[in-house]
Image (cartoon, grey):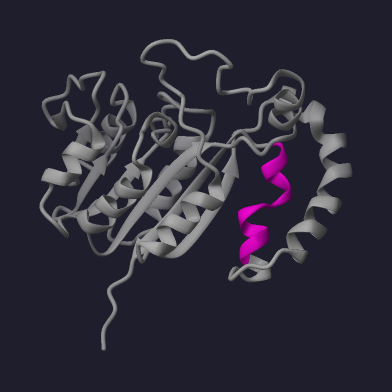
């Protein structure tokens, strides 16, 4: 089997995205459409195309082009593409490492929901700034590790969005079956493991005592122990078709 490419994201992220997609029984069928926005250099879209030749794929990005005649490429912003996309036309949307590069996230989540067919799936990933490494980096240097202190013109990663904010936006727009999984742990991240073990019990108690509509289980799925050492998270959600 061809290995799943890392592409333009962190280690193991695309592996988790792929597992989330193929867990859907209908994935890869001839009448299914997947939109990958942003697609980066198109490596992941090409992998899916080779693996599932019957799957229709549309790849969207502003700064790169996908040189593959079997993939429909659109050189547009995600906002512009989905504003033009026919409502309820996509079965799967992947937004891999795009949140930190986009503005207007609330509107984009709304566009995702409108573009999905009933029972459609959104898989969205983002850098995790809740790690012990990021917390210490902010304490001493005033910025999170994966976000520069001084931005350059046209900086790629600039938009800091917390996982709880994304989950809240998904819920507000009607997405259901929201699941979050943390991934991408490098060897150097394990150096912060002893500190994470000390901090997490205090954080867990604080999490329990907060007033929220989220259940205890949902809170700890949102902020498990692994969130203190993992550099990325993957959120899967569905547009559930409700019947009377």
Q: Residue furthest bottom?
A: 244
Q: In this rendered view, identify the residue nearer to me: 69 or 135.
A: 135
Quadrant location of the N terminus in the rendered image: top left
Please tell me which residue is depicted at 74% across the width and 48% down the height of the picture. 225
Q: Eyeballing the image, is 177 above or below 39?
A: below
Magenta region includes residue 225: yes
* Residue 69 shown left or right of residue 9 in the figure: left
The answer to whether residue 219 is above or below residue 105 is: below
239 lies above or below 77: below
Question: Which quadrant does the C terminus fall into?
Answer: bottom left
Residue 128 left/right relative to 174: right
In magenta, the rendered stretch is: 218-229
Horizontal and vertical percent position of residue 115: 20, 54
Quadrant assignment, res 231: top right
Looking at the picture, how far across and down is residue 27, in whole percent? 29, 54
Compared across the picture, whether 167 is left or right of 82 comes to right
Number of marks present in the image shown: 0
Q: Nearer the viewer, residue 161 or 11?
A: 161
| Residue 168 included in the magenta stretch of the image | no
On the image, the x and y values in percent for residue 48 come to 29, 38
148 vs 208, left or right, is left
Please tell me which residue is depicted at 44% across the width and 32% down the height of the picture. Answer: 100
| Secondary structure that dominates the magenta span | helix
Q: Quadrant of residue 243?
A: bottom left
Nearest the viewer among 13 and 241 is: 241
Q: Residue at x 50, y 40 (%)?
A: 161
Q: Position of residue 119 (x, y in %)?
A: 29, 66
Q: Name the residue rendered at 36%, 15% in the picture.
A: 154
């Amino acid at each position: 089997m061809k290995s799943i490419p890392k592409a333009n994201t962190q280690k193991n992220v695309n592996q988790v995205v792929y597992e989330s997609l193929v867990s859907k029984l209908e994935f890869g069928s001839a009448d299914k459409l997947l939109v990958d926005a942003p697609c980066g250099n198109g490596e992941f879209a090409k992998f899916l195309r080779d693996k599932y030749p019957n799957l229709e794929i549309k790849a969207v990005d502003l700064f790169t082009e996908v040189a593959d005649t079997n993939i429909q490429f659109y050189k547009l912003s995600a906002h512009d593409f989905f504003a033009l996309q026919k409502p309820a036309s996509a079965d799967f949307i992947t937004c891999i490492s795009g949140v930190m590069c986009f503005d207007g996230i609330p509107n984009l989540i709304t566009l995702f929901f409108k573009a999905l067919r009933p029972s459609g799936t959104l898989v969205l990933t983002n850098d995790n700034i809740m790690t012990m490494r990021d917390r210490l980096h902010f304490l001493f240097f005033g910025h999170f590790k994966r976000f520069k202190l001084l931005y350059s013109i046209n900086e790629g990663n600039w938009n800091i969005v917390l996982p709880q904010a994304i989950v809240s936006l998904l819920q507000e727009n009607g997405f259901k079956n929201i699941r979050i999984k943390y991934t991408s742990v490098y060897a150097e991240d394990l150096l912060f493991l002893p500190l994470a073990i000390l901090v997490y019990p205090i954080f867990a108690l604080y999490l329990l005592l907060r007033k929220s509509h989220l259940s205890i289980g949902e809170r700890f799925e949102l902020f498990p122990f692994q969130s203190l050492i993992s550099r990325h998270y993957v959120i899967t959600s569905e547009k559930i078709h409700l019947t009377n």
